[in-house]
Amino acid sequence: MPTLGLIHNSPVLAPIFNEIAARLMPDVRILHFVDESTIKNTIAAGKLEKPTMRRVIQMVGSTFDAGCDLALVTCSSIGPAVDMAAELYDQPVLRVDRPMAEKAVANGTRIGVIATLSTTLKPTADLIRRVAAEQGKDVEIVEHVCAGAFDAVMAGDGATHDRIVGEALTGAMQGVDVIVLAQASMARVVASLPEGAVAAPVLASPELGMARATELLADLAK
């Protein structure tokens, strides 16, 4: 049985990816690896630092030591470290937001990116710019941080988080071709909004990342 290693910065993400895995890859064994220090230290420093990058690279290695065929890192804030890990290991290493960035670039030239943390916004926007450059496309990125949303959800106030994100989706993102959610936890807000409230298509990383992982695992099995 093929095995997928999922690397998270919070245990609350595991159920989200388990649900997707049950639909997209029921015959794949899923192993979860969680280290909250990777996001907490990044937030505290305001940027991705070298000790955290080394920790991410080590965690990717741990998935392969545990028998995983592919490692999928589910946090966008530590994306640059994932790119480094992909160069160091023979097995495939996937950023969860890479397929989302590719789809965004394929679907528009004015791309909105929203996040609840600046430390997540920048790596996601940078990835979209890199993908656009690789494809020879010129894009304009409209960036927006949902101020107060992260603190609210950390305090257990999910309603305030969802309200702030919803206001950004329906207000700050006017006039874009496609909207990218920099954090997996924001996807639930889209489902709660009235139909037609958001003018542009909204992309979230978990579903697209897991779909890409499914394809890669199928290729490995050939």
Image (cartoon, rainbow, N blue to C red):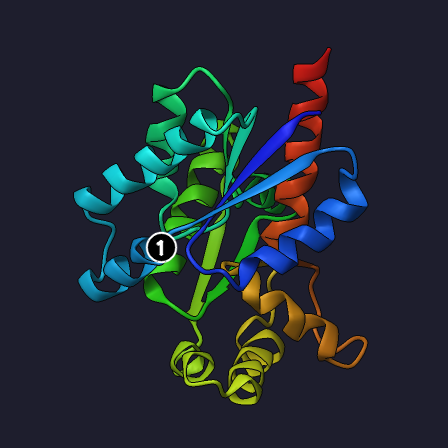
**Placement of the N terminus among the 4 image quadrants:** top right
Say how many tags the image has: 1
The kind of residue on which mark 1 rests is Lys
Which of the image's four quarters has the C terminus?
Answer: top right
Question: Which residue appears at 39% of the width and 80% of the height?
Answer: 147
Where 190 falls versus 78 (above or below)?
Answer: below
Q: Report whether residue 13 is seen.
A: yes
Residue 102 placement, left or right of 49: right
Left/right of residue 110 with respect to residue 81 in the rendered view: right
Q: Residue furthest top?
A: 222
Residue 50 position in % (x across, y down) = 18, 42
Q: Can residue 177 be seen by looking at this rendering? A: no
Left or right: residue 102 compared with residue 29: left
Q: Nearer the viewer, residue 15 or 195?
A: 15
**Secondary structure category for the residue under label 1:** helix
Q: Position of residue 30 (x, y in %)?
A: 63, 40
Whether 102 is drawn above or below 145: the answer is above
Q: Quadrant of residue 36?
A: bottom left
In depth, the one of 73 and 34 nearer the eye is 34
Neighbor class of circle 1 (other Cα within 10 Å; few <14, some 14-19, many 20+) is some
Q: Position of residue 210 (x, y in %)?
A: 65, 42
Q: Position of residue 43 (x, y in %)?
A: 27, 64
Q: Residue furthest front?
A: 66
- Residue 151 vs residue 16: left or right? left
- The vertical placement of 220 against 24, above or below, is above
Q: Residue at x 33, y 40 (%)?
A: 56
Name the residue carrying label 1.
122
Which residue appears at 43% of the width and 84% of the height? Answer: 152
Front-most of residues 189 and 64: 64
Q: Residue at x 59, y 51 (%)?
A: 205
